[in-house]
Every structure is written in structure tokens, then in C-alpha cells.
Image (cartoon, coloured by chain):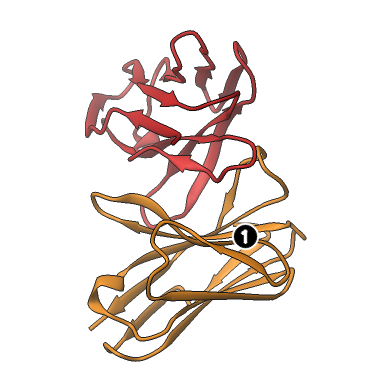
Amino acid sequence: GDSVTQMEGPVTLSEEAFLTINCTYTATGYPSLFWYVQYPGEGLQLLLKATKADDKGSNKGFEATYRKETTSFHLEKGSVQVSDSAVYFCALDNYGQNFVFGPGTRLSVLP
Amino acid sequence: DAGITQSPRHKVTETGTPVTLRCHQTENHRYMYWYRQDPGHGLRLIHYSYGVKDTDKGEVSDGYSVSRSKTEDFLLTLESATSSQTSVYFCAISPDKNYGYTFGSGTRLTVV
């Protein structure tokens, strides 16, 4: 079945550092790919998405590019802030199936 | 989150008692989902609904039942709560496949 693998962390960075969280997937067909963010005590919020190969999703300084050749959707941000501390989930939606979430990556950004 | 509310936000209950969690949406979305989130297990799908009175099981459905008598409400019932059902429960909605989900704020359930 479909699956999502992501680095589990925790990832600890200093403020203004560059962030990469790796995500790879296994799926038949052409799924849509998503990144969700969960702040402490809250539900998951959609951060960005891409629906086809080579699409780039972006939001709040975060970016991810749908790479079908490497089955990847890595999340990047050029300069993280303390307020970016959260858990980040990579997910796929293969039309006709239910969502598949990765295990989540906890990010801590230190001032 | 706007358009989706879960109640209660927190609940403590005793082993063996029935418990019902409610998810209410104002978006008129077709799909509704119940997940549980546990450390080390991530998000696991319990049940989902693809329309009024149309529901199906997810990967961890044992001990849970659901009902959807109206588009806007999706109820999750723990028939006889056990300590292993202590968890944070999230409801999610979606208008269609491939659109992504909108999540509620969660219900923290403790079974003692």
C-alpha cells in the first residue's frame, strides 16, 4: 500500500538557520502531496500542497517541490524562527484512497 | 479551526463507560474522518464517512463506532472505554478526495 517516510527528528536548529525536512513516498499513480504543521495543543494545519509533478507548494516562507523521479517532497525554509517550533507531517492523498501520513518530525528552534 | 468544532475538548471517564465525541462542521463537506494521535504511532484512522449514513472502518476501528445522521455531524462512540483508548482524537473534513483535510482542534480523552 501507499506509504510516507520522513525523518523523525527531533530536529534542533538555531534561529535563522536553514531547514530541510526530508519526505519520500511510495504510491501508485499520481498522488497529491501535503505538508501539515501541528503547534503544541492544537490540531494539524495545512501548510502547503502540490498536486502534480514539478509543482512547488509554498507558504509562510516554507517550500516543497513534488519530485516524481525521486518520489520526494522535502520541506525547506531559508531562515527559521522560534515560532516555527512545531511538529511537521508529510502526507499523501491518492485519489480514491484515504490520506496517508508520515510519522511527523518535531522541530525545535532555539533563540 | 474555522468551520469545524469538536466537543468536548477534554474528558476524563472511567473504564467500562460509554463515551461519545462530537464533530460538527459548517462547511457542508462530504467527507469526515476520525483519527487518534498517540506518541510513537502518529495519526491513525479510526472511521470515516463519505456521506450521510455512509461510513467505513479505518485501521484501528475495534472498540469504536460512528454515526452520521446529518451532513454536519459525525459522532464517535467508544462503546466501553478502556485505558488503551486514552488518546487525543481529531476530526477532519474534506470536500472531496485530493483536496486535503481541515482538522479540528482535538479532544483529549483520558480513561481511568
Q: Quadrant of residue A95?
A: top right
Q: Residue at x 30, y 24 (%)?
A: A15
Is A82 situated above or below A65?
A: below
Nearer to the camera, B43 or A97: A97
Q: Quadrant of residue A105?
A: top left
Residue position for label 1:
B32
Chain B color in figure: orange
Letter of the chain that mark 1 sits on in the rendering: B
Q: Which residue is drawn at 22% across and 29% down?
A: A12
Amino acid identity at mark 1: Met
Quadrant of image for the C terminus of chain B: bottom left
In the rendered image, the residue lying farthest to the top is: A69
Using residue B36 as the reference point, say whether residue B16 is left or right of it: left
Is A90 situated above or below B53?
A: above
Chain A color in figure: red
Q: Residue at x 25, y 25 (%)?
A: A13
Using residue B39 as the reference point, say whether residue A95 is left or right of it: right
Q: Position of residue B30 (x, y in %)?
A: 73, 57
Q: Which residue is drawn at 34% across and 39% down?
A: A104
Using residue A47 as the reference point, say whether residue A2 is left or right of it: left
Q: Is mark 1 on a helix, strand or loop?
A: strand
Quadrant of image for the N terminus of chain B: bottom right
Q: Quadrant of residue A8?
A: top left
Q: Where is residue B17 in the image (x, y as percent from the top left)?
A: 35, 91
Is A12 situated above or below B29?
A: above
**Residue count near mark 1 (Cα–Cα under 10 Å), binned few <14, some 14–19, many ≥20:** many
Using residue B12 as the reference point, say whether residue B53 is left or right of it: right
Is A16 situated above or below B56?
A: above
Q: Position of residue B37 (x, y in %)?
A: 36, 57
In the rendered image, the residue lying farthest to the right is: B28
